[in-house]
Amino acid sequence: MNETSNYTPPKVWTWDAESGGRWASINRPIAGPTHEKPLPLGQHPIQLYSLGTPNGVKVTVMLEELLALGKSGAEYDAYLIDISEGDQFGSGFVEVNPNSKIPAMLDQSTGSPTRIFESGAMLLYLAEKFGALLPAEPAGRAECLSWLFWQMGSAPYLGGGFGHFYAYAPSKIEYCIDRYAMEVKRQLDVLDRHLADKQYMCGDEYSIADIAIWPWYGLLMVEGIYDASEFLSTNSYIHLMRWAKKVAARKAVQRGQMVNRTWGPEEGQLHERHSGSDFETRTQDKIES
Ligand SMILES: N[C@@H](CCC(=O)N[C@@H](CS)C(=O)NCC(=O)O)C(=O)O
């Protein structure tokens, strides 16, 4: 193994310089707002402030699934938060999410608005509010919540660990890439073995466990996020690949993936969403242009 650094940590860490790498300009060691900026408010019950990253996509897929089930109370306005510009540190955003990370959500249908932060909390909140996509009987519910929380605990190793050191860090550090590739491959094997005899994460029924896991592990399989398909041999996880493709084919998943997305092919981007017809208009724009 290459030894890449002789760095000796000082007694007390201080914030002296940007750390380098793709996200260096937004990283800081203090919480709280950096500037005054109220959030916009739309007409719909649910207000979402987000970006089309995997954590954001979980919630837009959930909302589109609920609307597809006829739950009109899940109508939503989705506003774009550009984390590369520091929008997550605006005063209005920090009031909804003191942790300054997308997604953040407000439910305006509850009299005084209810704030929800953390994508897993949003999935659970919405599933309970609308009585959907979460098994009602205790054993099924326990299994579903176990996988939901598995995702919340595991994905930081994929994104913040593997993705960061493989794709974003200013230099390739073998120790870090090895450590996180090992863990990510173990996680892929967990999912692959679990899905060997199941259609969905909790059996025959699609649920919030699938909605939480797919934007990270499903997209790694079908879209090769971080350009790492070959490196991680993702094709070898055949049950996980079958599940990833099946979930990717759902209309609500395709819609949810477009919302607040600002990169990739233009026809796959809907920067803000205020009505279901926005998707059709978006497609129409493309046909006419
Ligand atoms: N555990 C959080 C993670 C959210 C998160 O990490 N969001 C990232 C984008 S995917 C973010 O907003 N980063 C901005 C920053 O770190 O300043 C959730 O699932 O909601």
Image: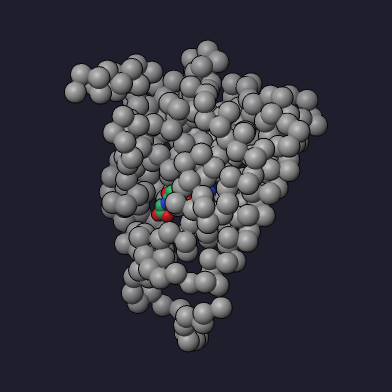
Q: How many marks?
A: 0
Q: Work out which quarter of the rendered image holds the N terminus and state it.
A: bottom right
Residue 103 visible at all: no
Q: Residue furthest top?
A: 70
**Residue drawn at x 69%, y 24% as measured from the top left:** 205
**Residue drawn at x 51%, y 39% as measured from the top left:** 222
Q: Position of residue 244 (x, y in %)?
A: 58, 35
Q: Position of residue 30 (x, y in %)?
A: 41, 63
130 versus 244 height, above or below: above
Q: Position of residue 90 (x, y in %)?
A: 32, 48
**Which image quadrant for residue 130?**
top right
Residue 186 visible at all: yes
Left or right? Give the position of 84 relative to 73: left
**Residue drawn at x 49%, y 34% as measured from the top left:** 59
38 versus 180 height, above or below: above
275 versus 160 height, above or below: above
Left or right? Give the position of 240 relative to 175: right
**Which image quadrant for residue 53?**
top left
**Residue drawn at x 32%, y 52% as measured from the top left:** 84
Q: Residue furthest right?
A: 139
Specify how the rendered protein is coloured: one colour
Q: Position of residue 207 (x, y in %)?
A: 64, 28
Q: Work out which quarter of the rendered image holds the C terminus and state it.
A: top left
